[in-house]
Image (cartoon, helix red, strand yellow):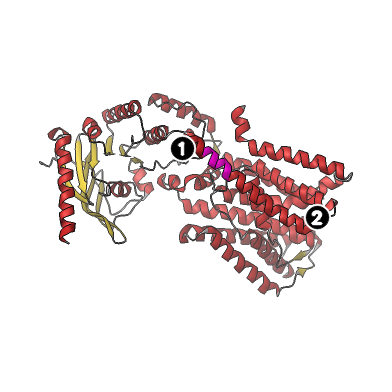
Amino acid sequence: MLSAKTKEPIVEMKNVKKAFGYIQALEDMNFSAYAGEVTAIVGDNGSGKSTLIKILTGCLKPDEGEVWIKGRYFSSLTVKQSIKEGITAVYQDLALDNCKDCAGNIFLGRELVKHGIFLDHERMRRSTEELLLRLHISIPDITQPVERMSGGQRQALAIARAVYAGGDILIFDEPTSAMGVKETSRILKLFLELKAEGKSIILISHNLFQVFDISDRICVIHNGRFVDSFLTKDSSPQKLHELIVEKEEELSDETMAK
Amino acid sequence: MKRWLSKYSQQIFLFAAMMVICIVLTRKSEYFLTWRNIRNILEANSYRLILAIGMTFVIASGVMDLSAGAIVSMCGVIMAVVLHMEIPVPAAVLIGILSGMMFGIVNGLLIHYTGINFFILTLAVSGMLRGVSLIITDGKPITKFGQDFIYLGIGRIGELQLSVLAALFLVLISVPLMFHMKWGSYVLSLGGNREALVKSGIRTGFYRASVHAFLGVMAAVTAVIITARLNSAEPNAGMNMELDAITAVVMGGTSIKGGKASIAGTVLAVLILGVIRNGLTLMSVSSDYQQWITGFLLLVSVLISEIKVHKFRTLMK
């Protein structure tokens, strides 16, 4: 497939390596995402997708390689640096405090205060209501703890938190896996709206049809290595599926040969 | 209303239980419901409440500190040694409190950076501190302090002992600290989901260390009260005090897994345990039974807490 590169990337990883003990999670990984685009990362389970985004968000430090964000070089990032650079993520585990309510989670780490030290619960609750309304996210009782919400509601809340954070690079790791059809379509529409606002979106999804619905560019990774990157319009779910299967068979042959 | 009742069910139950116990004890002893006895209960439990408040924050953060009683003993010994060096009382108290804070910080940092199970870690620290207390004192109490220091344990303002007023003050500041300030909110999130804090760019090590420092300060204040009241610093002071504190916190509705806390519940539970102790004493029941009852109530509280979680998970399925 033809690799596509038309402009300077907003996020770029070059030859990044990351190992956990004997397991090499990323091996010479190269990845680029571009401003105002939806870039989908596609790969099988264990291909290194989550490790890749954890390096971008500062949750993991790479063993080797370069990370470039908006033209600035980082050998590794901290979570704070990543947030400062405008990166916000919705993780697969959602990273919600299940004992807190919607406002407590949306404002975690960026709480509104009154009189300098006291949490402004009322203002945070009102802002949460407005945010959820704006994003068409329906949670009947926003004052209940998150542990009492459905999986879909929790995912929607995590997405709302990422949107509220206001970063210009949004990373979503399997953001709709627990959602129903209606909720999923609402969230995908939201992603397109965010893109229209100029945000860059990095999407990890197993759902190839979803990837083709909203992405501009697809990056395929396999077994911790970069495979290919191309414009979505130049490919199809069928071709992509074949590419993934082909890589899986190559790996299987390599293992047999060893 | 229904949600309010559900949210505060444990505290309402505790309040009702306390009322029932009080009614029974009033019928059993005419002395029970006198101002003198009520004052006795408050004075005898003021330092227990102070330690339990500190433990509430630590348990809310998702761990326990089994060295709290040993910190009480160690801080008492440190203050006693310093007082015998003829250092002024305010300076000695400050040194004691800073020592408690330091022991707490060490506990918190060890838990955060070593990843060793907090039970084992704080148990080890407890053993070490008890050992050091015994070495410093040669196993004997350090006694005879000046009146200025003793006043901190038995002095009164109006009808109430200073220790009761100190406990009341600490309860009153704990509520906004836990529920209306960032620090308390992050302490709760440490117990709720530490990963959520980490991924929000919050330094969890600071909050782990500071919540243990808070308990350390509470343990040191407890040590001031006990040492001054007894006019003696004993290496075995504060023995099993952490068990009483943990029992009260869990009975009060603070989640043993962290993330949820109730200061009012802790206050009620300390009072219930105090009323039970007082009632048993009035009925001339041996203090051995009091220890048994404390252990039994801890077991029942943990079981209730587990049943509530299990019931909730079943409902969610």
Q: Which residues are magenta?
A: B306-312
Name the foreground residue: B65 vs B292: B292
- In which chain is the residue bearing label 1? A
Q: Where residue B154 is drawn, which disc sits there?
A: 2
Quadrant of the frame with the N terminus of chain B:
top right
Residue B309 in magenta stretch: yes
Residue A181 placement (x, y as % from top left): 32, 27
Image-based side of B199 in relation to B216, left or right: left
Q: Quadrant of residue B106?
A: bottom right
Subunit under mark 2:
B
Question: Do marks 2 and 1 share a subunit?
Answer: no
Q: Please give the name of the residue rendered at 46% of the width and 36% of the height, measured from the top-left corner.
A: B317
Residue A190 in view in this figure? yes
Q: Is residue A186 left or right of residue B5?
A: left
- Residue for badge 1: A105
Q: Look at the numbered disc 1 and give the secondary structure of its residue.
A: helix
Which amino acid does the dot numbered 2 rest on? Ile
Does any portion of residue A7 appear in the rendered image? no
Amino acid tagged 1: Asn
Residue A185, horizontal then vertical, whole percent: 31, 27
Q: Residue at x 68, y 63 (%)?
A: B73
Out of A218 and A201, give the one closest to the viewer: A218
Give neighbour class at mark 2: few <14, some 14-19, many 20+ (Cα, 10 Å). some
Observer-side mark, 2 or 1, equals 1
The answer to whether residue A52 is magenta is no
Q: Residue at x 51, y 51 (%)?
A: B207
